[in-house]
Structure formats: structure tokens, C-alpha cells
Amino acid sequence: MQISLEGKTGLVLGVANKRSLAWGCARSLAREGMRLCFTYMGERMEKTVRELAADCPGSLVLPCDVTAPETIDEAFAEVRHEFTSLDTVVHAVAFARREELQGNFFDTTKEGYMIAHEVSAYSLTAVARRALPLMEGREGSIITLSYLGGERVIPNYNVMGIAKAALEASVRYLAADLGPLGIRVNAISAGPIRTLSAAGVTGFSSMLDNIAEKAPLRRNVTADEVGDTCLFLASPLSRGITGSTVYVDAGYHIMGS
Ligand code: NAD
């Protein structure tokens, strides 16, 4: 089976710049012909996202802050107006305060905990609920981005690890809910990649060194590799897969230390 996404549409949340994993996903999807809508968070990001989106024929660019439900509603109303239906959603959105991504997990504040979960975990459910009416009957695919810190203790990842655990559990519950409607929901657990968000994790460079030394493939992964797995999960090639977490981490997750 060949992958062609001509005539398909996708919504990509989480492009901040050309290093974003969301942009890696978007490049792969657009390469195979998918028409995309990008959302950006905050006016500061708009120009960059518009410049990147210009490389994707027929794309839309809309504001959306997942902590402001009315902006999610407005984005979906515009997607419905422009695309009528939706085949794919890429959710690549996460946030935790920098001070929560260092030191001891037990110092996490209630507010920091809530923000991390609202943006990084609950938003998937908020988006999936709104995507549902546009995806019904389309064999849609919802893809989110996770990290090994949701399963194992990774120094300094702290509250974001708890949010990723909630995100991966949400993938399973959403997959069970939406499977009967033909909609699949999966996560990609990516290895560390230098992005804007990653820069907020204390000791990030040593995480990269550790993977290069210990992962079976003895290297780090790229946003393009994440993007191509996203393409697979968006395409009919993965039609039998839902509720799964697929690792794109050079095999690091199998190692004991
Ligand atoms: P990034 O900074 O490029 O992307 C994060 C995005 O989240 C940004 O576009 C930002 O605008 C968006 N965002 C933050 N708060 C938001 C809000 N309230 N509403 C809407 N959007 C909001 O970083 P990235 O590394 O590409 O992160 C994308 C996803 O990949 C995240 O879920 C991240 O946890 C995950 N991930 C990253 C790595 C890594 O090492 N970079 C590894 C595994 C998983």
C-alpha cells in the first residue's frame, strides 16, 4: 500500500518554530498531500507559524490557547467552515513552569501541577471532543506526543512526567471511546530533541548525551523521524493500531539503565 494523503485534512497544534516536533509532523503529512490547519499560541508566534505554513499549500493558520476553551471552539468552527471534515489531529502541546522542571518533584506547587496537566494532558481530551463531529465516518486518526518520563523517573522532568502519564492514559480511554466510530488515537513517545520546550528541562544536554551513549542505535532521533511515524499513524498503513504508544527513541526505552 502506498501512502497518499491527497484530499485529506489535518489540524496541527503546537508549532512554535522550525524545530518543533509539530513542524516535523506537519512536513511529513504535507509532503504526502494532506491539507493542514496550524494553530499557534500567542501573538508572538503568529509570524513564525505563518512563514512556516506558507510552505504547505492551502494551509490555514489560526490562534488557539488550549487553556481558553473559547479559542478552541473558534478554531474548530473555522476548520469546519474551511475544511468541512477532518482526518487527522496532531496534538503536540505541552507546558510546565521552568521552576517545576528542576529539583525535587515533591516541591511541585498545586498551581504548577494544574497548569502542566491542563495544557499537556487535559487539552488532548478537549480537542478530541471537538474533533469528533468532524471526524466521524472519516476513519480519523488523533496523534499526541509523549515522553518516557511518563513511565519512568527521569531527573528534572518531574510534574511533566505525571502529566505525560495522564496523557498516555487519556490516549487509551479516548481510543476505547472513539474506536467504535472508526477513530484511532495513539501517542508517539519521542526521544529527547532540542526544541523550545525541551530547553526548559534542566540538564537536557546530558539527556541527549546519555541516549547517544546507551540507546541501541547509539544516537538521538530527529523531528523528521517523529514526523514520519506521525505520517504512518495518520495513514491507513496503521489502520489496525489504536490506544498505543509508539516509541521513536532509537530504542532507548528497552534499556535497563
Ligand atoms: P515546542 O516548544 O516546539 O512545542 C510546544 C508547543 O506547545 C508550542 O508550540 C507552544 O506554543 C504550545 N503550547 C504551550 N502552551 C500552550 C497553550 N496553552 N495552548 C496552545 N499551545 C500551547 O516543543 P516540542 O518539543 O516540539 O513539544 C511538542 C510536544 O512534544 C510536547 O508535548 C512535548 O512534551 C513532546 N515531546 C518533546 C520531546 C523533546 O525532547 N522535544 C520529547 C518527547 C515529547
Image (tube, rainbow, N blue to C red):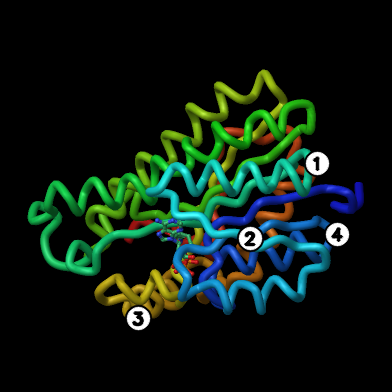
Q: CA distance from mark 2 to mark 1?
A: 22 Å
Which one is earlier in the sequence, the residue at label 4 or at label 1? 4
List x then y, in percent, for residue 241: 67, 35
Q: Nearer the viewer, mark 3 or mark 4?
A: 4
> What element does badge 1 sit on?
helix
20 versus 114 height, above or below: below
Which one is earlier in the sequence, the residue at label 2 or at label 4? 4
Report the quarter where the C terminus lies.
bottom left
Callout 2–callout 4 Cβ contact below 8 Å: no
Q: Residues within 10 Å of mark 2 (few under 14, many from 20)?
A: many
Amino acid at circle 4 = Gly
Q: In the drawing, does residue 251 fall left or right of residue 165?
A: right
Callout 2–callout 3 Cβ contact below 8 Å: no
Q: Which residue is mark 1?
A: 236
Q: Nearer the viewer, mark 2 or mark 3?
A: 2
Q: Which residue is mark 2?
A: 38
Q: Residues within 10 Å of mark 3 (few under 14, many from 20)?
A: some
Amino acid at circle 2 = Phe
The residue sitting at 54% across, 76% down in the picture is 17
Amino acid at circle 1 = Pro
What number is the disc on residue 205? Answer: 3
The residue sitting at 52% across, 29% down in the picture is 174
Q: Which residue is mark 4?
A: 33
Q: In which of the image's four quarters is ligand 1 placed?
A: bottom left
> What element does badge 4 sit on?
loop
What number is the disc on residue 149? Answer: none
Q: Nearer the viewer, mark 2 or mark 4?
A: 2
Q: CA distance from mark 2 to mark 3?
A: 29 Å
Q: CA distance from mark 4 to mark 1?
A: 14 Å
Which one is earlier in the sequence, the residue at label 1 or at label 3? 3
